[in-house]
Amino acid sequence: MQPLLSKPPIKPDECPIRYLTRVSEANGFLHFGYLLQHAELSQRNSSPPIKQLLEGRFDIHQYMEKLSLPVPVKKNPLKKIINDYQPNIHHPAILITTPKFCVKCIEKYGYAKNIWNILPILICPEHNLLLSNETRNGRKITWHERQLISNNGFKGINAKKFNGLIYLHDLINNKLNNINQDSQLHELFRHTNTTETISIINHIAFIIYKLEHSESGLLRNLKINDQFKLFNEASFIIKNWPNSFHDLLEKHHLKFNQCKSFSIQKSFKHIYKFIYKCREIEGYKLIFKEYEKFINTKQEYMRSSDLNRITHFSLKPQNLRYYNRKDVIKLLHTTSRTINKLIEKKTLNTILVNGELKFSKDDIDEHARKKSENLNFSQTMKLLNIPEKKLHKIIKNKLLIITSYPDKSNKEWSINKESILQFSQSN
């Protein structure tokens, strides 16, 4: 590989994807997929692992070492957010899918900030401008976009009407950097980590959207102008908690009484179900408490059938002792055939409960934990970015820890993830 002509250092708060784009531009590559191809690190069709890099799940250090670029001192803060993320509890959209930027920051500092990749971050407090994800012609920018500041005449939108977005920016930024003590924080966020804080903000915005539109959808898929209004209103509700929350519910309850819309009733039920699942998390406890208080105050105005539709739903109890086969397949990301083989090997034990074969929750949880600590053969090849023959040679030389070899009943390799990461860093 020929050495790069330009090797700018990565800034402490710079987005890793935009950094690689910046290096690509400085060295004349069309986008950083070709830069990785130059370093023999390319993925299929020169497509870089954008999502994995964004979430901190892909080690950028191996890219930078291969390209002889300065290694960042600070770890990607978004990695901690993703590590704490629980898909069945937290709001499904934490990070964005398309980049946002502040025009003035790009002009002044010449790079894109990592914090802009968090969904509720929609403003730059330094320049009091709303973040944009479009060119001046209205086209959405991509992660491969060259020269963000080349949009001559695009000055950004003043954030004067959206002061609530500054409050959300400061709240998340302080959580991310452990600036404020819990006692100084809003009661909803007093005992929450960064992931839970973002999730609560997103959920409040989702409640507003759900009641207004009576439809589902990810907030990150909305147009950015709609996101400005939605999160600004969410900020108002948070700052005036709990009165503003009750006012929001009251407004839509009156709408329900006037038109008897099934979709509004369904929205109330959907929101109740969502909050109910999260009620054990600090912050969500208060939301659930206020939501139940509102529902209870409306009992005299609602028919019992209407109330039942809102507060009663099918939800699996949190204290399950057993899993059925369908649950196990979903939890272990495997097939029914593999489950049968694991039962034959007595790796998994079954119990007869009410005439149905069940699996012990503790056994399955332990098996899932062990599985998460290991990778199979193809996953290891992908992580190390090496061909099959080379991986066989590495295994033969005992440079990786093999926890399970393939056999007649199980054709999968099981390779210790920690040993793979250590090998990757040492090579």
Image (spheres, rainbow, N blue to C red):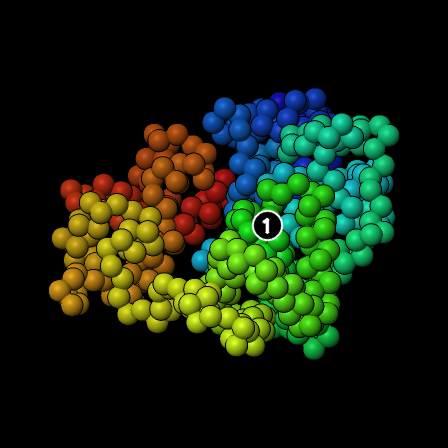
Q: Is residue 184 above or below residue 178?
A: below
Q: How many marks?
A: 1
Front residue of 92 and 371:
92
Picture coordinates of residue 150 (x, y %)? Answer: 80, 28
Q: Is residue 140 visible?
A: yes
Q: Quadrant of the N terminus?
A: top right
Q: Is residue 30 above or below residue 289?
A: above
Question: Which residue is rendered at x = 73% and y = 75% of the image?
Answer: 184
Front residue of 340 and 387:
340
Q: Which residue sits furthest front?
A: 258
Question: Which residue is rendered at x = 65% and y = 22% of the image?
Answer: 30
Quadrant of the rendered image containing residue 290: bottom right
What residue is disc 1 on?
A: 213
Picture coordinates of residue 225 (x, y %)? Answer: 72, 43
Q: Determine whether, in the image, residue 117 is placed left or right of residue 385.
A: right
Secondary-structure class at tag 1:
helix
Question: Which residue is rendered at x = 51% and y = 75% of the image?
Answer: 299
Picture coordinates of residue 182 (x, y %)? Answer: 67, 74
Q: Is residue 39 visible?
A: no
How would you rate the neighbour count of disc 1 (Cα within 10 Å): few for under 14, some for 14-19, many for 20 or more? few
Quadrant of the rendered image containing residue 222: top right
Q: Amino acid at mark 1?
A: His
Front residue of 21 and 352:
352
Picture coordinates of residue 364 (x, y %)? Answer: 29, 61
Question: Which residue is rendered at x = 38% and y = 69% of the image?
Answer: 318
